[in-house]
Image (tube, rainbow, N blue to C red):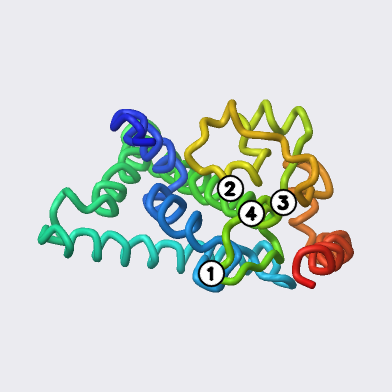
Amino acid sequence: MELPKISVTLGRLLYSMIGNPDFSIEHVYIHHAFLCTDKDPATAKKGESVYRFFLRSSFHGHLAAWRFERDRLNRSKTSLYSLENKMLTGYLMCLIWPILYLSISGFTGLVICLSLMLAGKFVFEAINYVEHYGLVRSVNEPIAPHHSWNCNTRMSYIVLLGLARHSAHHERGQTPYWQLAAYPDAPQMPYGYLISLLVSMVPPLWFAIMEPKLQRWHTQYQS
């Protein structure tokens, strides 16, 4: 399903508010293709803290998006330094907010803007962290509901516009969010999104809660 160009542009503009120009590329073309494999920088490994994951996913996800754009532009014989490069236009979008804050509130505004962008980016990556933590998939294995931690709590579903039904989001990536299935038999997060995110900030507690769930997952799906 081809999204309207205006929808894609507005989405990229929203991502730019947290300094994330690569998400619309990395998430769609890399994460959805390679989730739960070593080729996916957005899948957290077992025993990896959310803080370490934040650094690894941010860096390697950014590089992966650049490689994708380079290859895409090479195929169409378009210059890497043209405005057809979505990474470059993404950078320009990201610059809007610091310039706006700086012009309104000076240096203090700039510091606030950059702090908000960093905090937003961290939360964004933390969501990726809890959605696939410790799950694995071979490259040739079809993507299935058990390759995501699902969440069927009502509040998470409402606040995140259906994202909580993450198993369906990955199995049927082109399905509108309001049509995503609940999949009650899919692996479930220990709590709703907010509590799961807060728990993940304390790695020893997160590991202790998730270890039994991962053991059951491996017994059921990887045996």
* Residue holding disc 1: 140
Tell me which label, 2 or 3, sits earlier in the chain: 3
Q: Residues within 10 Å of mark 1 (few under 14, many from 20)?
A: few
142 to 97, vertically: above or below: below
What whole-number distance in Å separates the C-alpha atoms at marks 2 and 1?
A: 15 Å
What whole-number distance in Å separates the C-alpha atoms at marks 2 and 4?
A: 6 Å
Q: In x, y percent, where is residue 221?
A: 76, 64
Side (left or right) of 200 relative to 65: right
Q: Give the residue type that dot 1 points to.
A: Asn
* Residue holding disc 2: 171
What whole-number distance in Å separates the C-alpha atoms at marks 1 and 4?
A: 12 Å
* Residue holding disc 4: 144
What whole-number distance in Å separates the C-alpha atoms at marks 2 and 3?
A: 12 Å
Dot in front, 2 or 3 = 2
4 to 112, vertically: above or below: above
Q: In x, y percent, where is residue 123?
A: 61, 48
Helix, strand, or loop for circle 1? loop
Q: Give the residue type that dot 2 points to.
A: Glu
- For the residues labelled 2 and 1, say whether their Cβ atoms are less than 8 Å apart: no
Quadrant assignment for the C terminus: bottom right
Q: Give the residue type that dot 4 points to.
A: Ala
Helix, strand, or loop for circle 2? helix
Tell me which label, 2 or 4, sits earlier in the chain: 4
Tell me which label, 4 or 3, sits earlier in the chain: 4
Helix, strand, or loop for circle 4? loop
Q: Residue at x 29, y 54 (%)?
A: 87
